[in-house]
Image (spheres, helix red, strand yellow):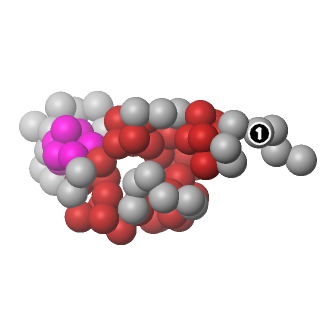
């Protein structure tokens, strides 16, 4: 194995993907994002983009679904009371 590389060899940086998912879905990252409250997706994108760049939006959409059981658009509609945005 090359010096300084860890993990499965696909990307540098090593680490455990499930640990990262747990951190942002139910751990300290989730407390920072405050899933289920208005603005949760945007807080996630702001926090995660430091580490993932442009991939943060997709990653946060998946974490939002895992944490709340709803996709971001479903959650936004529920918060508005089921009405369309104007």
Q: State the residue position of label 1.
A: 83
What residue sits 31% from the left and 38% below the top? 11
Q: Residue at x 19, y 38 (%)?
A: 18
Mark 1: give few (<14), some (14-19) or many (20+) Cα within 10 Å.
few
Give the left or right position of residue 69, taking residue 39 as reference. left
Residue 15: % across, % down = 18, 47
In magenta segment, residue 45: no
Position of residue 56 relative to residue 32, above or below, is above
Quadrant where the N terminus is found in the figure? top left
Query: What percent of the width, then of the height, locates residue 7?
Result: 15, 39
Name the quadrant containing residue 75.
top right
The residue tagged with tag 1: helix, strand or loop? loop
Question: Which residue is drawn at the image coordinates 82% and 45% (left, top)?
Answer: 85
| Residue 48 visible in the shown view | no
Q: Reply above or below: 43 against 67.
A: below
Where residue 84 appears, x then y in whole percent?
Answer: 81, 38
Q: Is residue 18 magenta?
A: yes
Magenta residues, start to end? 12-22
Q: Is residue 31 visible?
A: yes
At horizontal 41% and vertical 62% (from top left) the residue drawn is 33
Q: Furthest residue to the front?
A: 81
């Amino acid at each position: 194995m090359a010096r300084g590389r860890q993990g499965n060899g696909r990307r540098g940086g090593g680490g455990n993907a499930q640990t990262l998912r747990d951190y942002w879905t139910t751990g300290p990252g989730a407390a920072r994002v405050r899933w289920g409250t208005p603005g949760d997706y945007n807080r996630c994108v702001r926090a995660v983009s430091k580490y993932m760049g442009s991939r943060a939006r997709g990653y946060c959409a998946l974490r939002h679904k895992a944490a709340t059981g709803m996709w971001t658009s479903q959650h936004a509609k529920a918060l508005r009371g089921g009405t369309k945005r104007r």
